[in-house]
Image (cartoon, rainbow, N blue to C red):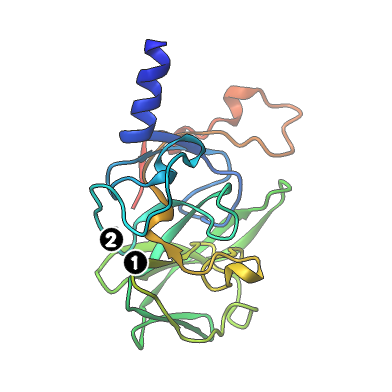
């Protein structure tokens, strides 16, 4: 009972482990990454505790505002039982838009720097080459993205105005991420209320490539040693 109580308190108030099952945050996060998210960075809501026990609220206990560029774990507004992870792109009051595949925040197109070619992996175990870029957010945070083209279905959007106490989330794998560019009513994420934040992803503690093509490889050969204890930005 004591051990169970300590685990409950620590995973509610301090930190919680998560794993990555999809490629929407590649190249920053890979399928099979296991990571630790701190729970205290943004304060606490009903989604900080198991089974979302507690009343709904538009504010958080010990509330702290997340920063632009944070990698955030949150509950899907359209399906609260589902946990997602994306990068926080837009803060309350921001105007966010995609124009010909380029991200604009408050009317300014964000700088992109060519960073060569990367390898993306899909949920079926397939892999493909994709252009890699470094994007610079308005607060100076630099992060990698994957971009396959400039005229995809989410490359030209309306201008979104982020409401009070909500956030705009996007995946780093820009052409393979169903995120705030698509409304929750249409199967996307839409704007994410501050109540839905779960934690701040801080470090990859381990990683294993568990998808297809491993008939001749054991568990240790599947480990991605270079990703162990990798700090996230």
Which is more foreground, mark 2 or mark 1? Answer: 1
Name the residue nearer the viewer: 160 or 172: 160
In the orientation shown, which residue stands out farthest toward the front? 55
Q: Mark 2–mark 1 contact, CB under 8 Å?
A: no
Q: Nearer the viewer, residue 172 or 200?
A: 200
Examine the image and state in which quarter residue 174 appears: bottom right
Percent x, y for residue 76? 54, 56
Q: Residue at x 24, y 70 (%)?
A: 139
Q: SS at mark 2?
A: loop
Name the residue: 53% across, 80% down. Answer: 101
Residue 210 percent coordinates (x, y):
65, 35
Q: How many marks?
A: 2
Quick check: 51 above or below 125? above
Res 16 quadrant in image: top left
Residue of label 2: 67
Q: Position of residue 74 (x, y in %)?
A: 46, 52
Few, some or many residues within 10 Å of mark 1 (<14, 14–19, 20+)? some
**In the visual, does 120 lie left or right of 124?**
left
Q: Tag 1 or tag 2, which sits nearer the N-term?
A: 2
Residue 165's disc is: 1
Foreground of the two, 174 or 6: 6
SS at badge 1: loop
Give the quadrant of residue 220.
Answer: top right
Q: Viewed as shown, does residue 65 lie left or right of 212? A: left
61 displayed left or right of 203: left
Q: Which residue sits at x=60%, y=66%?
A: 188
Quarter of the rendering occupied by the N terminus: top left
Residue 125 horizontal/vertical position (percent): 71, 46
- Alpha carbon separation for disc pair 2 and 1: 13 Å
Q: Residue at x 53, y 59 (%)?
A: 77
């Amino acid at each position: 009972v004591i051990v169970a109580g300590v685990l409950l308190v620590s995973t509610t108030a301090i930190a919680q482990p998560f794993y990555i099952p999809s490629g929407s945050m590649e190249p920053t996060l890979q399928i099979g990454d296991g990571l630790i998210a701190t729970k205290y960075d943004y304060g606490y809501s009903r989604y900080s505790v198991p089974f979302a026990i507690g009343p709904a609220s538009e504010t958080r206990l010990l509330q702290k505002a997340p920063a632009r560029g944070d990698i955030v774990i949150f509950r899907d507004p359209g399906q609260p039982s589902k946990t997602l992870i994306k990068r926080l792109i837009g803060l309350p009051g921001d105007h966010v838009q995609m124009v010909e595949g380029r991200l604009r925040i408050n009317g300014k197109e964000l700088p992109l720097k060519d960073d060569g070619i990367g390898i993306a992996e899909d949920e079926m175990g397939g892999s493909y080459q994709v252009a890699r870029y470094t994007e610079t957010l308005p607060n100076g945070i630099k992060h990698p993205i994957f971009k396959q083209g400039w005229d995809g279905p989410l490359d030209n959007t309306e201008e979104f105005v982020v409401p009070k106490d909500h956030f705009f989330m996007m995946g780093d794998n820009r052409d393979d991420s169903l995120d705030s560019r698509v409304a929750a009513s249409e199967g996307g994420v839409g704007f994410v209320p501050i109540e839905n934040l779960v934690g701040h992803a801080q470090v990859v503690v381990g990683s294993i490539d568990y998808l297809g093509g491993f008939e001749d490889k054991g568990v240790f050969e599947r480990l991605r040693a270079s990703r162990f204890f990798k700090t996230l930005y």
